[in-house]
Image: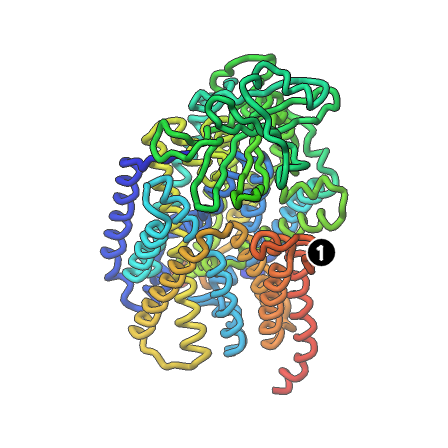
Amino acid sequence: MIYEASFVAVAFFFVFVAITLGLSFYLGSKAKSSKGYFTAHGEIPWFVNGVAFAGDYLSAASFLGICGMIAFYGYDGFLYSIGYLAGWIVALFVIAEPMKRLGKFTFADALDARFQSRGIKLAAGISTLAVSVFYLIPQMVGAGVLVQPLLGFPHWVGVLLVGVTVILIVVSAGMVSTTWVQFLKGSLLVVFSALLTWMILNRGFQTEPGGEDGYVFRTLGPVNSASDFAGLPELQDAEEIPPSGAWANLPYRRFRNKETGVVSVWRLDETQPDEIYLREAQTVAKTSDGTVYVNGQEKGSKKGEAELHPVGNITRLPNDESKTGPVGLLSFFSTLQNSEVLLWGSSPAIKDEDGSETTVYYQKPTPGSRVLRPGEHPRFSGIRSGKTLDKLNFLSLMLALFCGTASLPHILIRYYTVKDEASARKSTIVGIGSIGFFYVLTLYMGLGAMTSGSMDVTNSNMAAPLLARSMNEWLFAAISAIAFTTVLGTVSGLILASAGAVTHDLVTHVFRVELSDSEKVRVAKISSVVVGAIAIALGILFKELNVSYLVGWAFSVAASANLPALVMLLFWKGTTRQGIIAAVTVGMVSSLAWILLSADTFSKVYGLPATDAVVPFSQPGIVTIPLGFATLIVVSLLTAAKTADD
Amino acid sequence: MQRHNARIGLILFGIYLLLYGGFVFINAFDPETMELTPIAGVNLAILYGFGLIIAALVLALIYGWLCKPTAADADVEEVKE
C-alpha cells in the first residue's frame, strides 16, 4: 500500500514530544541526587505509578503486535494478552512488597539484600542488561518501521528521533520524567483504545465484496477439474504462463493479459475434491535490480498508481444480512462466530530464474467460528497437531509469559518509586486494572481491524493505525502519535533500568569505584546516553530483521534467570550466595543457548532449515525455568555448610 | 503483618494459578472444548480469556482489601508518631 504522510499525525507527534520534553526539563531540578534520579525520591503517588506501570509495560509489541496478530489470524494474538496480564499476578502476590522492602535502586539490590556479594551484583547486572537490550531492539526497530508509513520519514530518521527524544527524557530528570511520560502514554493508550472500541461496536458489521478502495477480488469456479479454468469467459483475453521453475508444484496459476501484458496470479482452492475454485491473489515481486512490481505493475509512489489493495472484509453475516447496525460487547462475538471473514495468507518468497523474488498474498475465506478459536496462527497451530512436543512448546510459551513479567528489570524498578509497601501493592492493583482493561480491548480492536477493509497484507503491525484511519483521519493521527509515544515510554524505562545496572551494580559494587552522589548521577546520565546510542545503532542495524520475537526472548531469559533466584530468596532460608549466582547464570545462559539452537531462530535468523535445529521445541521456559530452580537448590545445598563455616 | 500479607498473597496466587493452568491445559490438550458456545453464542475461548482478566482484577482487589499495613508502611509510622 502507498502511505502518504499525514500532516495531522506529524503535528500530533511533535506536540507530544514537545510536551514530554518540556515536562522533563521542568522536572529536571527535582532529580539532582541519585535517589531522585533513579527512584524519583520514592515520592510518586501510587495511582500515578500504577498507570505508569501500564505505560512502561504496554510496549509496541502489545499495542501493534497483538492487534496485528488478531487482525490477521484471529483469537491467537489474544493468548499473548492473557499471558502478559497473568504475569502481573505473580508480580502482585509474590514479588511487589518484598521487592520494595529489600531493594533500593535496582533489581540486583533486592537479590543481594542478604549477602552483599559482588558476584550476585555482577550476575544480576549482566542479566538486567541482556534482558533490557533484547527488549530495546524490537522497540527501536518498531519505531523505524512505523515512522515511514505514518509520518513519511525514512527508517533511520524514526529510530534517531525516538532515540534522541528518549535520551533527552532520561538524561534530564531520570525516573521523574520517565514516570510522567509513562503515565501520560498509559492514560492516552487506554482512553483512545476504549474510544476506538466504542466506535467499532457502534459501526457494527457489514458485508462488503472487497476492501475500502472498492476493488473486488475475483473468485472463479467451482469447476470439476483444474484444466476447466482455461475455458472460462473471465480468462478469455489471457494466456496461461506454464508453471515452470520455482512455480512448479505450487498451488498458483499465472495468466498474462494479451492486451496489457500484465500478469495476474491466482490460487487454486481444492479443499473440496469436486469443487475447485481459482481465487485472485495479490503479488509483490522484487527484481534483481531492485524494482518492485505490485500485482504485475511497477509499484507507484502516489495515490492512484499501482499499489496493493486494502483487504479484510466480511463476506457473509448471520441470516444473510448485509448490515448489523451497532452491536453489543457480547453480540460482537456471537455475530462474528456465525459469519464468514475473508482473511489473507502469504507464501514464502518464490525465487525465479531471472533473480526476481515474488511473494503471493492469497484469499482465505474463513468461518467466524475458526477465527475465534485458538490454534490458527502458525505459532499456535501445534495445539491441534496431536504431537506432544508441539503442545510442550505452547505450554512453555505460556509459562514464560506468566513468569516473565515479574522478572523484567524495567518493571521491577518502578517499585522503588513509591513510598512504601502498601503503595507498591496499590499501584500494582491499578496497573492490573488498566493493563487488563487494555488487553480486553485488544480483542475488539484486532477483530475490528480484521473486518475493516483497510488492512495492508504486507504489514500486520499497521493494523491498529489503519483501523483508526478507516474511522477518520483525526483518530488515525492520534493513534499513530500514541503508537510512537508507546515506544517512547517503554524505551525510557528500559534505558533507565540499564543505566541503573551499570551505575549501581557494575561500577559501584563490582568494580568498587567510589562515587559521590552527584558522580553517580553523572555516570548514570553517561550510561543512559551510551545505552541510548547503542539502541539507536541496533535499531538501524536490525532494520531488515523480523525482530518481534526478541520480546519473547526477553521474557524467557528474564523468567529463567531472574525469577528462580528472586522467589527462592524470599521463600527458602537455605538459599546461599553461590546458589543465587549459579541460578542467575545457568538460567540466563541455558535459555539463551536454547533460543539460539531452536527451530524458530534457525529459520528466521540464520535462514537454515528448521529441521536442523538442535533443541526439540522453540520455547525454552518449561525446561530452563525449572533448571534455574534446580540449580539454585543443588548449589545452595552444596555450599550451605561452607557458608555456615565462613 | 508481613507474614499475614504473604500468606494471603500465596493463597490467591494458588487460586489464579489453577484458573490459568486450567485455561492453558484445555487449550493444549483439548482445544475443541474451547470452541463450545455456552453463553450468549460466545465461545469458551473468549469467555474463559475474559474471565481470566476479570479474575486477575477481582483477586487483586480482594488482596488489597485483606492486606494489613506492615511496619515499614508510612501510615503505620504516622500512627506511631
Amino acid on which disc 1 is placed: Pro
Q: Is residue A126 above or below residue A85?
A: below
Task: Judge from the rendering whether residue A61 lies leftward or rightward of residue A535; answer left or right.
Answer: right
Whether residue A643 is visible to the viewer of this picture, yes or no, is yes
Q: Residue at x 57, y 52 (%)?
A: A604
- Specify the quadrant of the image occupied by residue A400: bottom right
Question: Relative to A466, is A393 above or below?
Answer: below
Quadrant assignment, res A248: top right
- Quadrant the N terminus of chain A occupies: top left
Q: Quadrant of residue A577?
A: bottom right
Q: Position of residue A21 (x, y in %)?
A: 26, 52
Residue A205 visible in the displayed image: no
Q: Which image quarter holds the C terminus of chain A? A: bottom right
The one nearer the camera, A335 or A150, is A150
Residue A410 screen position, x and y as percent: 45, 58
Query: Residue A642, position in %: x, y?
Result: 65, 84
Q: Residue at x 61, y 59 (%)?
A: A595
Give the residue number, with chain letter if any, for mark 1. A616
Question: Which residue sits at x=37%, y=45%?
Answer: A484
Q: Element under label 1? A: loop
Foreground pick, A312 / B16: A312
